[in-house]
Image (cartoon, rainbow, N blue to C red):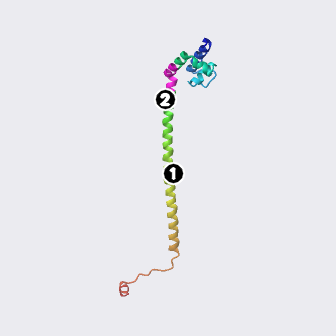
Amino acid sequence: MSSKAEQALRDAMERLLSGKPNRTDGALTKNNLWREAGVSRATMNRATSALAEWDSRVDESPTTALDRQRREELSEVRGKLRNSRQECRKLQDQVDAAATVIAALLAENAAFRDQLAKRSAVVIPLDRAHAIRE
């Protein structure tokens, strides 16, 4: 392991941890570390002391804590969104069922009104005496 490669890794580590990367998106990952340093993955893996320092500093980094908190919040929000979508589907199913029942009742009501309008017979009340004889 050359000291030049190890120094490149340490410089890249400082840039990434300070939030000022030159070659990557700035995420605190080992992929970004070797890319930022301009060395191969194998070279990075041979620099065990630099990797140990990376691991300890990333764990202590406030950026990592903030990222972890954001991931947890995002996971929570996604769960709430999933629950809201399920509730929305359930309510939409209820609305669809109610609309079907309402449409059936309206059709039945219209049929009864037509039947009532077409009646030609007139109901004449019978007196009680006449009703008893028959």
Of callouts 2 and 1, the N-terminal one = 2
Q: Nearer the viewer, residue 55 or 129?
A: 55
Residue 32 at x, y percent in the picture = 59, 23
In the displayed structure, would residue 94 be above or below residue 29?
A: below
Which amino acid, by three-letter code, is at mark 1? Gln
Q: Which residue is mark 1?
A: 92
Task: Say which quarter of the image contains residue 8.
Answer: top right
| Quadrant in which the N terminus appears | top right
Residue at point 59% right, 15% down? 11
Q: Secondary structure at mark 1?
A: helix
**Residue bearing the label numbered 2:** 69
Q: Is residue 124 left or right of residue 18?
A: left
* Residue 21 in sight in this render: no
Residue name at image x 48 percent, y 32 percent: 72
Packing grade of label 2 (10 A; few <14, some 14-19, many >=20) is: few
- Mark 2, secondary structure of its residue: helix
Q: Is residue 7 magenta?
A: no
Rendered location of residue 54, percent (x, y): 53, 19
Report how many numbered discs are placed on residues in the image. Answer: 2
Most extreme residue toward the bottom is 133
Residue 56 picture location, percent across and down: 50, 19
Q: Amino acid at mark 2?
A: Gln
Displayed quadrant of residue 132 = bottom left
Q: Are marks 2 and 1 in contact (CB under 8 Å)?
A: no
The segment highlighted magenta reads: 55-66
Quadrant location of the C terminus? Answer: bottom left
Cα distance, mark 2 to mark 1?
A: 34 Å
- Residue 92 in the image, given as x and y percentages of width and height: 51, 51
